[in-house]
Image: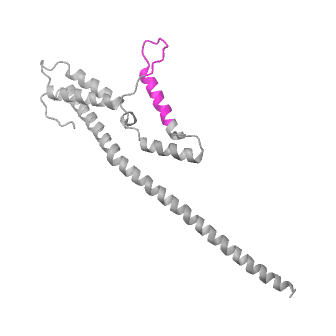
Amino acid sequence: MDSPWDEEISNDAYNGESHWQKIASDFTNAGYRDGITAGKEGALQDGFDSGFAVTGAPLGRDIGRIRGISAALLALTNKGTLALSSSTPGVRDGLRDIAAQLADIRFSDIVPPDLEAEEHAREHMRVEGEALEMDSEELNDKKDVEGLEDLLAGMSASGNGKERRPQRPTMQDFEVLKKRLEALVGTLGLQIQLS
């Protein structure tokens, strides 16, 4: 039959099938994207949980405890609550120096780099054929602010115009400060657990 109604019926059937295939394809793609997103979020959460439990929390707690102990001892010696004898010369100056150096340490100075994450990012970028960018705009802004802080901290009163680049403290520096504080605590005859 050559009626226009037959043609519309076949077009409707074709359009219906085409529409159904498009809907099925859209749902498949959406499901795939949702699965990928859920997988990434799960891996991200696992990585955060591990990093927080193994590195972040213990390291942050350690530096906070040492800063708190040094600040408390300095405050007690300055106030006279913790009397210093003539056999403990330089204790107050030592505590002041330790507290000042501890205040200069940033978490980013002493946290170990996540080599596994960096290697994963490099591998991902190689596969994607993109240039490796380990920095975000937010991270760059933070680095800029820290650079300005370092510059201000390194400025000398002499005004000789020479720019001095102070070296950031390391984990080894933190351990040395901890040992020095431990020695001062012993000198004071106190029993304080530093570790």
- 171 sits to left or right of 188: right
Q: Residue 19: horizontal and vertical position, in percent?
A: 69, 74
Residue for point 78% across, 83% down: 9
Residue found 42% across the figure and 44% down from its top: 116
User: Toward the viewer: 64 or 171?
Assistant: 171
Residue 52 placement (x, y as % from top left): 35, 47
Q: Is residue 101 left or right of residue 34?
A: left
Q: Is residue 124 visible?
A: yes
Left or right, 13 with reference to 59: right
Answer above or below: position of 182 versus 49: above
Rendered-image quadrant of the C terminus? top left
Task: Tell me, yes or no, whether the highlighted magenta stretch contains residue 25.
Answer: no
Q: In which quarter of the image is the N terminus?
A: bottom right
**48 or 81: nearer the viewer:** 48
Quarter occupied by residue 117: top left
Q: Which of 20 and 127 is in front in this view?
A: 127
- Residue range in magenta is 141-165
Q: Does the image show residue 82?
A: no
**63 up-or-down from 23: above or below:** above
Residue at x 44%, y 19% (from the top left corner): 155
Is residue 154 highlighted in magenta? yes
Quarter of image, res 5 = bottom right
Residue 57 position in % (x across, y down):
32, 45
